[in-house]
Amino acid sequence: MDREDRSREARTEPRPDDRERQRERAAAPPIEREHETWQGILEEDERRERERG
């Protein structure tokens, strides 16, 4: 295996700290919002702004 092959392999293999971060993201609880879609979230944010203002 030459140096180019090793560097290509190194780029495709995730680093150990990256693997750990992916596991943390998968284990994180979902954000509790009233709506699941981005449009619903925007509408919810606008409604909260109106209530505050």
Image (cartoon, rainbow, N blue to C red):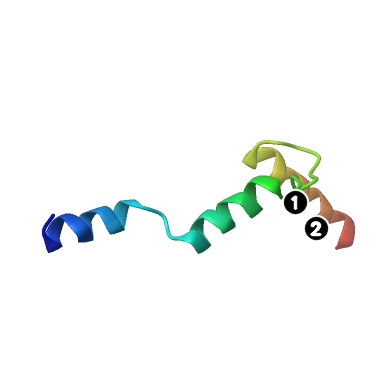
Res. 1 image quadrant: bottom left
- Binning the other alpha carbons within 10 Å of mark 1 as few (below 14), some (14 to 19) or many (20 upward) gives few
| Helix, strand or loop for disc 2 | helix
Mark drawn on residue 49:
2
| Residue at the spot 64% in from the left edge and 45% down from the top edge | 26
- Where residue 20 sits in the image (x, y, percent)? 57, 57
Mark drawn on residue 7:
none
Residue receiving disc 1: 46
Q: Are marks 1 and 2 in contact (CB under 8 Å)?
A: yes
| Residue at the spot 43% in from the left edge and 60% down from the top edge | 15
Q: Identify the image quadrant of the C terminus.
A: bottom right
- Where residue 30 sits in the image (x, y, percent)? 74, 45
Which amino acid type is shown beneath numbered disc 2? Glu
In this rendered view, identify the residue nearer to me: 24 or 47.
24
Which amino acid type is shown beneath numbered disc 1? Glu
Res. 32 image quadrant: top right
